[in-house]
Image: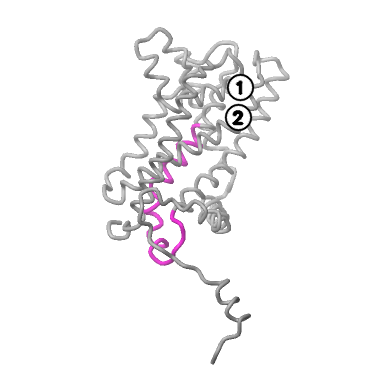
C-alpha cells in the first residue's frame, strides 16, 4: 500500500535517530536541552525520594547545616576562638556551612551516578549527563531553603547592629552559586567516570570531601594563613575564594577577605575541571555497562 505525502511527513516528524558518540569532544549539548523535561522529572524524583518516609521532610534541609553550624560555633568559635571579632559567630559559620553543604552534597551524590543508577541506565537511552545535572539542581532547591533561613537570621542581626557591612558584592552571589555548581559537577563527573573501573574511589569520596572542607575556610577565617609560607597554596584551593567572597558580600570585610586574582584563578580552574569532566564522562558512558 502506497503512502500519501501527508502520511510520509507525519512519519518523519516522529523519527529519532540514535548514533554512537565517536569523538572525544562530541558532547551533544543540544540533545541535553531536548531532554529538559526528563531533567525536571529526575529533579522531582530526587527531591521526593530524599525526604520520603521522614517525619520532618524538607525540614532536614535546615536541620543538617544548623547542627553543623552549632558544632562549629561551639568548638571553633567558642573553645578555639577562631571566629573573627566584630561578627556574630553563629551567622559567620552558618554563612560558610550552607554553601559548603551544597558543594559537598552535590559532589558526593554525583560521584556515584553510574553505580546508583545502573539499573536505569542499562534499560533506556537518554543523555547520561542528565542525571548529574539533575542532582545539582535538586541540591540547589535545598540550598534555596537554607539561604532563605539564613537571610532571616541575617536580617535580624543586621537590625540589631552586629557590626556587619554588606556591600554591592551581594550582586555576585548568583554567580558564586553557579560557579559552585559547576565545580561540584566537574569534579563529580570525573570521579563518577573513574569509579566505573576503580570502585575504591567511591569509598574515599566522603572522607576526601571532609578533608577538603578543613582545607577550605569554613571552620576558620582565611586570615589565619596571613604571613604563612602556605598562604598562596591555601588560596589555590578553588573553593577557598568562593567561600570567602560569599562571606565578604554578606558580612563585610570584617568577616572575610576579597582576593580577586585568586577568585579569577578559581573560575579558570572551575571551567577547566568542568570541560575535562564532560569530555571524560562522554568517553566513559559509552561502555560503562561493561564495567559497572
Residue 100 drawn above or below residue 282:
above
Disc on res. 173: 2
Q: Which residue is mark 1?
A: 249
Q: Which residue is drawn at the image coordinates 55% and 36% (left, top)?
A: 178
What scheme was used to colour the molecule? one colour
Q: Spatial distance from mark 1 to mark 2, Cα to Cα?
A: 8 Å
Assess whether residue 75 is covered by the magenta stretch.
Answer: no
Asked which quadrant contains residue 147, the reply is: top right
Q: Which residue is drawn at the image coordinates 47% and 14% (left, top)?
A: 82
Assess whether residue 113 is covered by the magenta stretch.
Answer: yes
- Magenta stretch prevailing secondary structure: helix
Question: Mark 1 or mark 2: which comes first in sequence?
Answer: 2
The 10 Å Cα crowd at callout 2, few under 14, some 14 to 19, many 20 or more, is some
Residue 242 picture location, percent across and down: 51, 26
Q: Which residues are magenta?
A: 100-128
Asked whether the residues under the numbered discs 1 and 2 touch, taking CB atoms below 8 Å apart as contact, a structural biologist would say yes
Disc on res. 12: none
Tell me the quadrant of the picture where the N terminus can be found: bottom right
Amino acid at each position: 500500500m502506497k503512502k500519501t505525502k501527508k502520511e510520509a511527513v507525519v512519519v518523519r516528524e516522529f523519527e529519532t535517530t540514535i548514533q554512537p558518540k565517536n569523538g572525544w569532544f562530541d558532547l551533544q549539548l543540544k540533545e541535553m536541552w531536548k531532554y529538559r523535561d526528563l531533567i525536571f522529572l529526575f529533579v522531582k524524583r530526587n527531591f521526593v525520594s530524599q525526604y520520603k518516609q521522614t517525619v520532618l521532610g524538607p525540614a532536614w534541609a535546615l536541620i543538617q547545616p544548623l547542627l553543623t553550624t552549632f558544632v562549629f560555633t561551639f568548638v571553633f568559635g567558642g573553645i578555639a576562638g577562631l571566629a573573627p571579632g566584630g561578627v556574630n559567630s553563629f551567622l559567620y559559620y552558618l554563612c560558610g556551612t550552607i554553601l559548603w553543604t551544597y558543594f559537598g552534597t552535590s559532589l558526593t551524590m554525583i560521584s556515584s551516578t553510574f553505580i546508583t543508577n545502573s539499573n536505569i541506565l542499562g534499560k533506556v537511552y537518554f543523555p547520561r549527563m542528565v542525571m548529574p545535572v539533575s542532582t545539582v539542581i535538586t541540591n540547589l532547591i535545598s540550598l534555596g531553603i537554607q539561604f532563605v533561613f539564613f537571610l532571616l537570621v541575617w536580617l535580624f542581626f543586621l537590625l540589631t547592629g552586629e557590626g556587619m557591612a554588606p556591600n554591592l558584592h551581594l550582586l555576585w552571589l548568583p554567580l558564586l552559586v553557579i560557579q559552585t555548581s559547576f565545580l561540584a559537577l566537574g569534579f563529580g563527573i570525573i570521579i563518577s567516570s573513574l569509579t566505573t573501573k576503580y570502585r575504591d574511589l567511591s569509598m574515599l569520596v566522603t572522607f576526601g570531601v571532609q578533608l577538603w572542607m578543613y582545607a577550605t575556610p569554613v571552620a576558620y577565617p582565611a586570615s589565619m594563613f596571613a604571613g604563612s609560607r602556605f598562604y598562596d597554596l591555601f588560596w589555590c584551593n578553588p573553593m577557598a575564594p568562593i567561600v570567602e567572597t560569599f562571606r565578604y558580600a554578606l558580612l563585610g570585610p570584617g568577616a572575610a577577605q576579597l582576593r580577586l586574582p585568586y577568585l579569577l584563578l578559581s573560575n579558570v580552574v572551575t571551567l577547566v575541571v568542568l570541560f575535562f569532566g564532560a569530555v571524560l564522562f562522554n568517553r566513559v558512558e559509552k561502555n560503562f555497562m561493561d564495567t559497572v
